[in-house]
Amino acid sequence: MKTLKMSLLALLSAVGFNSSALANFYLSGGGLYMDSVAAYIYDVPGQSTNYIENGLNYNYAYFAPDGADLNFSTFNREQVTGGSSGTSNVAYFPAANIAALAGNPSDSESGFGITVENAAGEGAQLGIFNSSATGTPYIFFNDMTYGDALNAYTALPGSFDSIGLSIFNDGAYLYPSYTLDGGQTFVAAASWDFNSFAGTTPVNAETTAFGQTAVPVPAAAWLFASALAGLGMIRRNRK
């Protein structure tokens, strides 16, 4: 019976993790910039309301994704947009967002970042997620024009207060880079693993900042229900 209780506790922990994996993220530290100008950010239609604040040379958004937002089966995404994409598109996020990811090393679905994308889903995404291999936060660049293939990733650098994720649009391709605390920008392909920056520039693209969170896995809930049912059967048999 003690072994059964321990197994049940493990299942409870698994279900609890999937629920606690939900995290909130912030766009701040300057917010969303396009071509060195702070963009006026606003909600993407059809999603639950973000807390948004716009001001001179700064903006702020609070992402708390839920079922009312974009639903991708395993995660919900909430976005703000700054309108038509520029040549240089940068979104600033506080380091506290990374701490939220590091606290759930098995969760590689939750994360935050920036996209340059059109209505057809063509473009590129630059975001910070946990690596499925190491369980630690990494910067990932995804080419969404050709099947959402992973094109590049790089480990996060040392301590910092804020990180700017940038997608540079040269008119033909989209290139990732990042900046720490508004300082040096890292754009050299040699500093990234996989050097094929394929993100083709889409027509009528918009710049969007996002936060997304994992949703509870139905399979875990099913296992929990099965465990409860099994516990009931054992108790009946013992009677």
Image: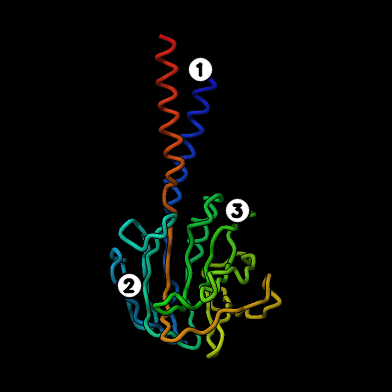
- 235 or 160: nearer the eye? 235
Circle 2: residue type: Val
- Distance of label 2 from label 1 (alpha carbons): 52 Å
Q: How is the image coloured?
A: rainbow
Q: Earlier in the sequence, mark 2 or mark 3?
A: 2
Instruction: Give the residue at mark 2.
Output: 44
Whichever of callouts 1 and 3 sits on the residue coming sooner in the sequence is: 1
Mark 1, other Cα within 10 Å: few <14 / some 14–19 / many ≥20? few
Q: Quadrant of residue 132?
A: bottom right
Q: Quadrant of the C terminus?
A: top left
- Residue placed farthest to the right in the image? 190
Instruction: Give x and y (percent) for residue 208.
Output: 41, 75
- Pick whichever of labels 2 and 1 is earlier in the sequence: 1
Q: Is residue 112 left or right of residue 130?
A: left
Q: Residue at x 57, y 77 (%)?
A: 176
Q: From what the image shows, is residue 33 above or below residue 209?
A: below
Q: CA distance from mark 2 to mark 3?
A: 30 Å
Element marked by disc 1: loop
Q: Nearer the observer, disc 1 or disc 3?
A: 1
* Location of residue 171 in the rendering, given as x and y in whole percent from the top left corner: 53, 90
| Residue type at the position of mark 1 | Met
Q: x, y (%) of residue 105?
A: 56, 51
Residue name at image x 55 percent, y 49 percent: 106
Disc 1 designates what residue?
Answer: 1
Q: In x, y percent, where is residue 50?
A: 31, 66
Please name the residue shown 42% across and 72% down the image.
209
Q: Which residue is located at x 42 percent, y 68 percent?
A: 210
Disc number at residue 135?
3
**Extreme residue in the bottom direction:** 171
